[in-house]
Image (tube, rainbow, N blue to C red):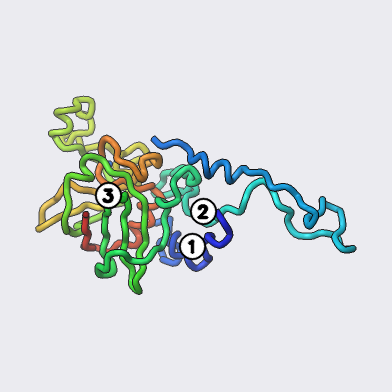
Amino acid sequence: MSQSSLLSRRRFLNLSGLAMATGLAGCTSSMNTDRFRYQTNPVYRGPDYPAPGDTLEGEIADGPLPTGLPDVSNDYAYAYGEVLDGGFQIPAVPYLQIDERFLRQQVSDPFGEAPGTLIVDTRAHFLYLIEPGGSAMRYGVGLGREGFAWSGRGVIQWKQKWPRWTPPDEMVARQPKLKPYSIANGGMAPGLNNPLGARAHYIFQNGEDTLFRVHGTPEWKSIGKSVSSGCVRMINQDVIDLYDRVRAKAPILVV
């Protein structure tokens, strides 16, 4: 990643949610080989870069010498780093293995919806939160069958930290191994292996549950892809960030 593309400190505060009081506390991909080659490409010391202790025009060289790795944004390393949340230790995400299009970033608003609106672009695998002033926070998402099963306008009727997962009875009938987590048995307890992840946003339309969710997942490899099951999946660090930005009864548009 070039120096010109690094996030400014102010922009990172927006990305990380640290500008807010709550902040971060508060349903298979391979490595990008081109990026890997670029990041490990040797940098050869030229005549303008003396070896340590040598002199340049009579002066001792100071400052860092070039290495085999270009500069990388420490901001993303922090945003996707390990985090303790709700008593659970969420592992760091190897964000360099994710197409950088799907990393959390502030972009120009491509939709023109009212600030506070969430928009899920199922074709591009993006979720946008529209902000004032013509900008939007964009997150990469993974989509499963359920993620394509509903579209239109709704509201985030409620949202929950570390939710329980209760698969519908129809799903339990198809997959009997899920019976211990059925509605009758109280669902699956919150945790790192819970399919809803660290946060869940429940979408209603005309007062009825659509069964469509925007939720977290530990399966970061599914981001930007269509997977076998689930609704709208987000990296746990991203869904925590989104949760702290979304107001109650926020409108949502799925296209």
Q: What amino acid type is highlighted by mark number 2?
A: Tyr
Element at label 3: loop
Residue under pointer 2: 78
Foreground: disc 3 or disc 2: 3
**From where the camera sits, is residue 92 visible?**
no
Element at label 1: helix
Q: Which mark is residue 12?
A: 1
User: Are dots 2 and 1 in contact, CB under 8 Å?
Assistant: yes
Looking at the image, residue 54 sits to the left or right of residue 239; the answer is right
Name the residue at the top extreme. Answer: 176
Q: What amino acid type is highlighted by mark number 1?
A: Phe
Q: Which mark is residue 123?
A: 3
Foreground: disc 3 or disc 1: 3
Foreground of the two, 240 or 96: 96
Residues packed near mark 2 inside 10 Å, few (<14), some (14 to 19) or many (20 plus): some
Residues packed near mark 1 inside 10 Å, few (<14), some (14 to 19) or many (20 plus): many
Q: Earlier in the sequence, mark 2 or mark 1?
A: 1
Foreground of the two, 78 or 53: 53
Q: What amino acid type is highlighted by mark number 3?
A: Arg
> Which residue is at a point 81% across and 54% down the rendered structure image?
50
